Image (cartoon, helix red, strand yellow):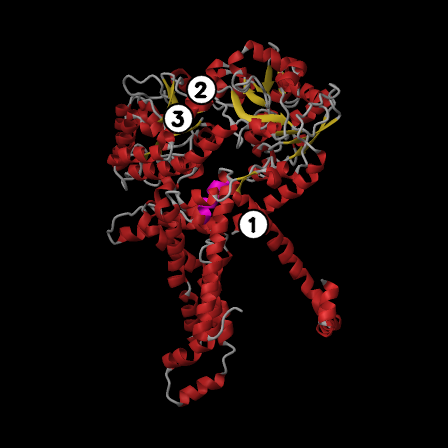
Amino acid sequence: MKSNNLSVQPLHKKSLLKRMAEYKHIYIILLPTLLYYLIFKYIPMFGNVIAFQKYSITKGIFESRFVGMKNFVDFLTNYKFWELLRNTLSINFYDLLFGFPAPILLALLLNEVRVLWFKKSVQTITYMPHFISTVVVCSLILTFVSSDGMINSLRALFGAESISFMTEPKYFYTIYVASGIWQGVGWGSIIYIATMSSIDMELYEAATIDGAGRFKQALYITLPGISETIVILLIMRVGQMLSLGYEKIILLYNPSIYETADVISTYVYRRGLIEGDYSYSAAVGMFNSVINFILLMTANTVSKKLKGSGLW
Amino acid sequence: MKNLKKLTALGLAALLTVAAAGCGGDDEPAVVNKGTGEIPETLTIYCGISGYATKAGAKDMNDMLPFQMMEEFTGCHVEWIHPATGSEEEKFNLTIASGNLPDMMVSNWKGVQGGAKMYADDGVIIPLRELMEENMPNLTAYNAQKPHVAKQYIDDSGEVYYIPFIRKDEQLKVYQGPQIRQDWLEKLGLEAPTTPDELYNVLMAFKTQDPNGNGEADEIPMSGVKFENTSQAIGNLLWMFGTANGFYVENGQVKYGVQEDAFEEGLKYITKLYADGLIDKDYLLNDRDKMDNKFMNDKVGFVYSLQPGNYYKNMNDGTRKVTGIAHPKAEGVTNNVFDSSYTQDVTGISIAVTTANENPSGSLKWLDNFYGGKGLEIINFGKEGVSFEYDAQGNPKLTDYIFNNPNGKSQQEMSGLSLGTYQSNFPALQLWSYYEQILSPWGKESIETWAGSAGTDGVVPPLSFTEEENETIAQNMSQIETFVSERINKIVIGNGSIDELPEIREKIKSMGIDEVIEIYNNALKRYNER
């Protein structure tokens, strides 16, 4: 093959090798990253073969029995399948709907603040929750919403009855999304604030001369200025639609709210790591990744059509 | 995604090892190499370490007094491999998948996924029956003396795959049950409840008559945790009605709680308690720590839990008193305890000999010291002159080294460091004679009360299943248990109604509960014929 290639397109090949030799330092710098992806992301993919097996740790990959699509069929016909899919999509959808714009709004608001000490303190305070570990955040949440917690105490001040938030399925989406915003809004706004600082000040001056007020300036200069960043972050966010982190949900949920709180990743966790059914959970995980991939591709294509720019 | 990565990494590890092991050629039945029969100079053993010992500073089980003594006594040095707390199962699986096996492995072989036999069939561990009888005179003598104990780990075909932790005395098996604020009962002039109705009345009095005396009706009469946990579950209230959340035996037949009439009666009772505000509104959010906090802050009057040693430590101020009450039961009920620890002398913790062990007979000879002779005293009491002294009658008595350690370590920490069977993490024969010395007065009293009032004939004995049976059980029960747990908890908190029970029963029938019950019945038959 190699010699064949060389004989067909010797010039092209040579020039590539030449270029590589010329910029060898840059290629060397690239090497660790390539190896990282190869070793930790691509090679392990072969392990996915256990999704088609009845995997047993004592037999290993080569000797475990092949069962074809059985694990996938079992999952798709499981009584929980639709519930899991619905919850995974809904939580993500609400998170996208409310959680995604929240940092943009905060960044826009902060951008208008001219009193520096106030701006800085607001930023610091909103960053803070990002650095608290998920375990602590979840136990804070559980304490806030418990029957004698902060929220119910506030309600009691107004004479409202105490609500058991964590045992009523209807509150879970709200609690999950709202706490996510609380934890992530400050951190998420950093990138937008940084982008805003690179917008040319002359544009604002020109707008002021044209008689645009603060609101119009934000709408017609700041927002378009950060729109590229918004789109890229949005595509990446859509690509993660189904890979919802399971840690937070596992720390928050309980059986009485499985109806709204149980998602694909928590189910994989219970089946795979607690019940030790590796093949089944590998199959579910693989299903999850395939859907993710489809969503990401769709988002990218849509973005290219609409804005003319995408991730690649 | 993260899970997937972990799984694929595990898969990869397995792939590499199988590739490496493949050269050996292992199709012919393994001939067990018995070894020299001499106690080896060194052994490598995989074993979880006692939590209190690590709290007290032990890095390794060789930092624990009984294992130091054992090395001196047997001349065998052990290199321990300890999994990190919380990732025991992962480490266990990785150790096996890696193919780099230690000489022996301590784990829950009794409840291991797929059954211990599968591990032997796949060449990870070796069968032990013959080796045990040849090399473990102490244990063999004990088995002959107590055949009902041996039956709990010698499987249906008469084979043995692991040597278990054994509780020698009856009292050691009873360590959890219902407990109540005795001082509240006395303050309100009430008797300890013995039936569901009496319990209801007592709890109602706790709620309405302000037993903690702070002028507010802030008492939570009963607290607990969700159904699927065991020791602290509010579902233990079902026991009074002769049923349980799970499998049990009635008239020689295995039953699954939800399918039975008694369960309906019990669930109605629990639902009523919850609706009347007698059960912690947040029981679903509780874990043991949260529950204990409420209890020790004078909020809670009644719980199911482990013996009240911890409550004694924190609440014993002369005015407060917690004690176990006799297991209550409804009229006509005989079996009112469905906790398997009450009947099983053998715990899950057990040791298996791997195929990598070059001297199985010698290893078992070493292990036999944990079941009799001088070694029995070493493992249970530690070192003479340090952790115990003989009294005038020649009985070992624990010393202030344990109770009032000069270095300021707590009694639990010192027990973890010095008493080898304290946290039952290494197989041995455990003795009541040391355990009763470290029990608090409240704990001792509770254990006596519970032992005297428990009807335990309904507990399912330790059955063994074939690989195929295991697969069916795992597959069906995984769906059924999630489903039942969700629906039952919802019924209790009033987000569902008891009228849904027929529908729930139909649904779990369609998920294959009958098939599983049949497997259990067959296994029970085999067990009884052992």
Let me know if marks 1 and 2 both belong to one chain.
yes
Residue in the picture at 62% in, 36% down: B96
For mark 2, name the chain: B
Badge 2 local density, few (<14 within 10 Å), some, or many (20+)?
Answer: many
Q: Earlier in the sequence, mark 2 or mark 3?
A: 3
**Element under label 2?**
helix
Q: As shown in the figure, which amino acid type bears the numbered disc 1?
A: Lys
Q: As shown in the figure, which amino acid type bears the numbered disc 2?
A: Leu
| Residue A283 percent coordinates (x, y) | 49, 46
Residue in the picture at 67% in, 58% down: A35
Which is closer to the viewer, label 3 or label 1? 3
Residue at numbered disc 1: B5
| Residue A264 percent coordinates (x, y) | 44, 49
| On screen, residue A131 above or below B16 | below
> CB under 8 Å between callouts 1 and 2?
no
Q: As shown in the figure, which amino acid type bears the numbered disc 3?
A: Ile
- Does residue B283 show up? yes
**Element under label 1?**
helix
Residue at numbered disc 3: B517
For mark 1, name the chain: B
Label 2 and label 3: CA atoms lie apart by: 10 Å
Along the line of sight, the residue nearer the viewer: A174 or A266:
A266
Tell me where the magenta segment starts and ends, as one range.
Answer: A265-273
Q: Quadrant of residue B38?
A: top right
Residue at numbered disc 2: B524
Label 3 and label 1: CA atoms lie apart by: 36 Å
Q: Earlier in the sequence, mark 1 or mark 2?
A: 1
